[in-house]
Image (spheres, rainbow, N blue to C red):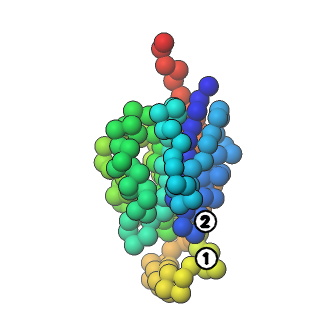
Amino acid sequence: MDNTLIVFASDHGTVEKCARELFSLMNGKVDLCNLNQRETLPELSTYDTIIVGGSIHSGKIQESIATFCDEHFELLATKRLGLFVNCLYTGEKAQKQLDDAFPGLLSQQAIIRDYFGGEVDELKLSFWERMITKQMIEKDDLVVALSKEKIERFADIISTAYEPKNT
């Protein structure tokens, strides 16, 4: 049976929402691990598939996700791997943020990588975050929305990529 871990960091709830949506769409045993709420990690070696997701702030993924990828790079490179980000951009800008979010070799190893769009919950933002986000949305004429289709496609691809190991 496939055994999947979804590791994520969610500052304002959007990444967690996407992780939970993936959780509901995945086959087999699936566990969630929010790095912002855990002091210890589950035993990563027991999982066949690991999905790592985070959000982009000021052009960078959260420090906890970057650190997780650096500290577990060798093990992650041996797993069926999926990588996702939430960001407010689309197209080339979103692709660049996805490309820059994870180490290049992990990105090459991943079965799938994608960006799911973004949401803005002003109640969860600080005053300065609200100001900067509002200016960014207006300046770049951004559409603030999550792509359910991309999340469903991601789950389908990583679920069907399972190949039983020869024992």
Q: Is residue 113 above or below residue 11?
A: above
- Against 48, residue 126 (above or below) is below
Task: Return the disc, 1 or 2, that comes first in the chain's sequence.
Answer: 2
Residue 124 is tagged as 1
Q: Residue furthest top?
A: 167
Q: In the structure shown, which secondary structural element does the residue marked by tag 2 occupy?
A: loop
Label 1, label 2: how many angstroms apart (C-alpha)? 8 Å
Amino acid residing under circle 2: Gly
Q: Nearer the viewer, residue 153 or 36?
A: 36
Tell which of 23 and 119 is nearer to you: 23
Can residue 116 be seen at all in this image of the molecule? no
* Residue drawn at (61%, 76%) of the image: 124
What mark, if any, has residue 13 been given in the picture? 2
Residue 121, position as x, y percentages in the image: 62, 75
16 sits left or right of 82 in the view: right
Residue 159 vertical placement versus 166 (above, below): below
Q: Is residue 119 above or below residue 160?
A: below
Residue at screen point 57% across, 59% down: 37
Judged left or right of residue 90, residue 20 is right
Number of numbered markers:
2
Category of crowding for the residue at label 2, using alpha-carbon neighbours closer than 10 angstroms: few (below 14), some (14–19), many (at least 20): some
* Location of residue 15 (image quadrant): bottom right
Residue at horizontal 43 percent and vertical 70 percent from the top: 57
Q: Secondary structure at mark 1?
A: helix
Residue visible at 39% across and 37% down in the picture: 75
Dot 1, how many residues are within 10 Å of its Cα: few (below 14), some (14-19), or many (20+)?
A: few
Q: Residue 138 at x, y = what percent?
A: 50, 83
Q: Most extreme residue toward the right, as rendered?
A: 24
* Closest to the observer, 120 or 5: 5
Q: Position of residue 67 (x, y in %)?
A: 38, 55
Q: Quarter holding the N terminus?
A: top right
Task: Give, as a three-letter code, the residue at label 1.
Answer: Lys
